[in-house]
Amino acid sequence: MALMERQKVVLAKADAPSNIAIVKYWGKQAIQEPVNPSISFTLSRARTETKVSYTAVRKELKIDFLFEGKRKKAFIPKLEKLIQALLPRMPFLQSGELFIESSNTFPHSSGIASSASAMAALVKGLYSIHQQLSQDDDSKMDAQKISAMARLGSGSACRSTLPGWVLWGETAEYASSSNLYGCSINELVHPLFLQLQDSILLIRSGAKSVSSSAGHALMKDHPYRQGRIQQANKHTAELLRALKMGDFTAFAGICEAEALSLHGLMMSSSPPYTLMAPESLAAIETIRSFRLQHNIPLTFTLDAGPNIHLIYPNEVKQEVLPFIEDCLKPLCENKTVIYDELSIQ
Ligand code: DP6
């Protein structure tokens, strides 16, 4: 009986969406805490699905990780760091065999493979195993707890455990904000911003030359560090106001200033680097002149990469889709655009 108990295989399945930040998290302190508040919205279609199986058979923990059917060694150090951080909350991670299989719903090596969705899904899966082993009630999955644990894997992952608009990081603008977990702010957002489209222009696929984690580290001694922290706090206050009022013009101004500041910070890091491609700049110019000509509310942002997220309200979708087809698709690698939208569920 004791032997059977020890060899029991515990299974869990979990999934989590990607998110796109409008005010960017850039720079960290302590254990994966941000140096400034950030605000994002969670996507619908770009998701990671993860299966975890755990067997309590060994003295030391053995981890096997497959991404889209293949062993992915590059992920192991991040995974081990997460497991170490989760140990006090999930003692089962002390020993045993952990087999993790993960896949994305968006195209393989599209350049938007996000550590946010991957880490959020993994933490949900591990937490489910923990609950089964400790015979906890599954329905008690606490949103704050899950978000805080996902943060330990990847900062932006703490925003992927919640639907819609999420604020992460302390700010005087929102009383219950925290550096430790994301807070849902949907209740204060105007309906215009609850139906946003995000069409992701895949300018370049493939691995980035400098990872986000390395980029965060370069913010430590960055000459514009203090200015950046002030700017992000100001943008947080302004974005919260724009989201409440349904002010798309103000929203677009903040969105673009954040995206271009992020890339400006990369270009002024020591050593400096660029992640934008010539086609990223061409797309930005094309988007701005289309907006000027047609007076249609649309804007863009970029993450730490060359791809452009084209963001617009659902109500102008019919006018924007032909523009994407005719003017933006030709700038994309293999003419690839991923049509996604804000998820409120
Ligand atoms: C530019 O969350 O990927 O996308 O905490 O080191 O895993 P780690 O970094 P990560 O950084 C995301 C940076 C960003 C902006 C954002 O999502 O807020």
Image (tube, grey):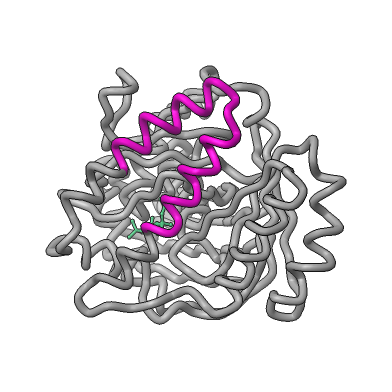
x and y, in percent, of residue 330 in the image:
76, 76
Q: Total number of numbered labels?
A: 0
Q: Residue furthest front?
A: 293
- Tell me what residue is drawn at x 87 percent, y 46 percent: 318
Please tell me whether residue 188 belongs to the stretch shown in magenta.
no
Q: Quadrant of residue 57?
A: bottom left
x and y, in percent, of residue 247 in the image:
57, 28
x and y, in percent, of residue 257 in the image:
43, 51
154 w.r.t. 326: above or below: above
Q: In the rendered image, is residue 83 in sight?
A: yes
Quadrant holding the C terminus: top right
Please tell me whether residue 249 belongs to the stretch shown in magenta.
yes
**Magenta part mainly helix, strand or loop?**
helix
Residue span colored magenta? 232-261
- Tell me what residue is drawn at x 43 percent, y 49 percent: 157
Q: Is residue 78 left or right of residue 84?
A: right
Q: Is residue 300 left or right of residue 36?
A: right
Q: Quadrant of residue 104?
A: bottom right
Camera-side residue: 95 or 253?
253
Camera-side residue: 295 or 117?
295
- Split into quadrants, the picture shows ligand 1 in the one at bottom left
x and y, in percent, of residue 240 in the image:
44, 27
